[in-house]
Image (cartoon, rainbow, N blue to C red):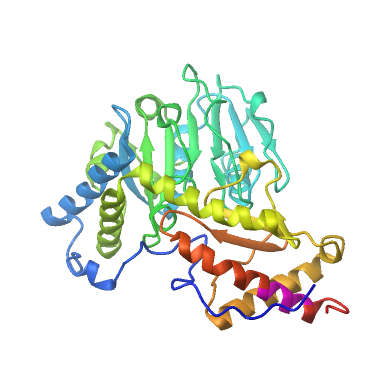
Amino acid sequence: MPTQSKPKIKPKRPFFSSGPCAKRPGWRPDVLAGALVGRSHRSVEGRERLKLAITRTREVLRLPEGYQVAIVPGSDTGAVELAMWNLLGARGVDLLAWDQFGRTWLRDATTELKLSDLRTFEAEPGHLPDLGKVDFSRDVLFTWNGTACGVRVPNSDWIPHDRDGLVICDATSALFAEEIDLSKIDVLTYSWQKALGGEGAHGMLVMSPRALDRLASYRPQWPVPKLFRLTNADGILHDVFEGVTLNTPSMLCVEDYLDALAWAFEIGGIEATKARARANASVLYHWIERSDWVKPLAVVPETRSHTSVTMRFAEPALADGPENMRLDVMREMVRLLEAEGAAFDIAAYRGMPAGLRIWCGTTIETEEVEALLPWLDWAYAEARRVVLPGGN
């Protein structure tokens, strides 16, 4: 591979982490000046800010009639597990896992909840399981976009409107970027730190009327921890959907989320956020098509993520070699790019094939992706020269 000249232009915001993700363009710490720090989230003013976050979430997502929103602890993980602990067990479950996080929900279902009627559909990194085998007379749990492997479901056509079970969707790295028909989702979860570049630790739980009916009529056989508890002896804790949180939230993070929502409205709402992600991913995928050293990890083009674009090394000298050699090249590339201030946090997720993972979600600017590309070529040539025998 020929020597690459070091590029002269760097991304102005070299933040391509897949979580926590880049802040929205133009963000400054002073947007948090009005945060209710030092005040109780139970105060009138605190309740108003939390309720406003829920109201604006409903508006920007354009939720169907009757859907409710809650702010929950534990980021997206907390939101998914809260849904599992409260809702599963009423009927059989089909669980899909093709990514590290889907496999986490699979472990929860098998080793923690010990579901007796569980069917699992798994796939290797880069692939989807057979969606046509899913039975929607049962509850269905899946991750819309595999953050670690960059594989997404291509659409919602495989989910029927007329179904008996609930559809529970971990959408944390898909929302605001992919086309999701929310009328086909009964429980949707995401976190502020991925969807809009907010601060961590807070999750969002969106529930359809069908999911709320299950919550009201069903009590699971296992204990539900206080942090997950949406019901008491009198029924649903309805004030959770009005801004009363299950534990103490950070009002600084709430203010940051409100700022991110205001930006989403300002640029044109969810259609604009999805367009930004598509534009960013398109630039990166077009570059990958021209590259002779990297390929998408997602095998089928229609399943390639618009947010977490995940790549594997494709040059035969690496692709056919040992994994430790690919890991060394990846680590050297990451070291070089961080030392130059050209890109941060783009290594493949642990447990995935060695390569790169670049966030292209809505808070990324397309020109930053364009500025990154020559740096990737340069870093690969340098890392290859260092790691591979006879690398020149």
205, above or below 233, in the image:
below
Q: Is residue 130 left or right of residue 226?
A: right
Span highlighted in magenta in the image: 378-384
Q: Give the quarter of the figure containing the C terminus.
A: bottom right
Q: Is residue 150 left or right of residue 291?
A: left
| Magenta stretch holds residue 382 | yes
**How far from the left and from the top, in percent, is residue 313?**
75, 61
**How far from the left and from the top, in percent, is residue 255?**
25, 60
The residue that appears at 48% across and 42% down in the rendered structure is 178
Q: Is residue 225 visible?
A: no
**Quadrant location of residue 317?**
bottom right
- Given residues 169 and 389, the one toward you in this image is 389
| Magenta stretch holds residue 389 | no
**How far from the left and from the top, in percent, is residue 285?**
61, 53
Q: Is residue 180 visible?
A: yes
The residue that appears at 57% across and 47% down in the rendered structure is 305
Q: Is residue 40 left or right of residue 69?
A: left
**Quadrant location of residue 155?**
top right
- Given residues 314 and 253, the one toward you in this image is 314
Prevailing secondary structure of the magenta residues: helix
- Given residues 381 and 64, the one toward you in this image is 381
Total residue callouts: 0
Q: Residue furthest top?
A: 162
**How far from the left and from the top, in percent, is residue 26?**
31, 67
- Given residues 163 and 294, the one toward you in this image is 294
